[in-house]
Image (cartoon, helix red, strand yellow):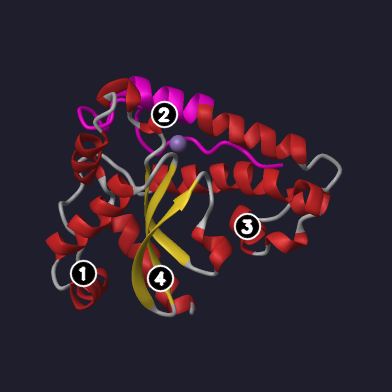
Amino acid sequence: MFTLPDLAYDYSSLEPFIDIETMHVHHDKHHAAYVKNLNDILVGHDDLLGMDINDLLSDINKIPEGLRMKVKNNGGGHANHSMFWQVMAPNTGKEPQGKLMEAIKSTFGDFSTFQEKFSASALGHFGSGWAWLVIDGGKLEILDTPNQDSPVSLGKTPILLLDVWEHAYYLKYKNLRAEYINNWWNVVNWKKVEELFESGVNHK
Ligand code: MN
């Protein structure tokens, strides 16, 4: 069985950038629904229900064909949101440090160029989906995916992600996705992203 993880911080603590009402609806309703649907879809498949969600998504051909798309959507929804809550936190630093910052500079030139490219990817994504910073072949890469598709299914290791489904911002920002993206940078938990980078690079 998959379970909805608790937030590591209060629902109100990302204010004023991410509002409390959005956090409640997003975590308690949207993410909870992905978890419930995933468990319902996999009833009787105890081997799959016992797997780590990212392991499950990294080899989706293991999933019976009739269930594959539903698992990709709902399992992706569970994995993506679980990571999204972790890469945000209140009172974070504005920039990463250490090896991650070095890698960002060597890949993108400087941090603000990286931010501009990531924001452009999030803003330019048509419809529902996610913007990502991933490790691929030991190198950093920005990409966007539709729906709940995870880069894990493409063999890439995600270290940062931004939800650009309307449910992530519409209550507060209405149609102003660019404003949501700009404000979101204030709550990025760079310590966590640094951890994910270092374990991802060492894993490869
Ligand atoms: Mn979402």
Q: CA distance from mark 4 to mark 2?
A: 27 Å
The quadrant where residue 114 appears: bottom left
Q: CA distance from mark 1 to mark 3?
A: 28 Å
Residue at (52%, 24%) from the top-left corner? 29
List x then y, in percent, for residue 145.
46, 53
Q: How many marks?
A: 4
Q: Which residue is mark 1?
A: 101
Q: Which residue is mark 4?
A: 135
Q: Tags 4 and 2 in contact by the CB under 8 Å rule?
A: no
Report if residue 54 lies within the magenta region.
no
Q: Cβ of disc 2 within 8 Å of ligand 1?
A: yes
Q: CA distance from mark 3 to mark 4?
A: 16 Å
Q: Which residue is mark 2?
A: 167
Circle 3 SS class? helix
Q: CA distance from mark 3 to mark 2?
A: 23 Å
Q: Which residue is mark 3?
A: 57
Q: Nearer the viewer, mark 1 or mark 3?
A: 3
Q: Earlier in the sequence, mark 2 or mark 1?
A: 1
The answer to whether 16 appears left or right of 1 in the picture is: left
Q: Amino acid at mark 3?
A: Leu
Q: Nearer the viewer, mark 4 or mark 1?
A: 4
Q: Amino acid at mark 2?
A: His
Circle 1 SS class? helix
Q: CA distance from mark 4 to mark 1?
A: 14 Å
Stretch of the chain drawn in magenta: 1-29
Q: Earlier in the sequence, mark 3 or mark 4?
A: 3
List x then y, in percent, for residue 196.
39, 63
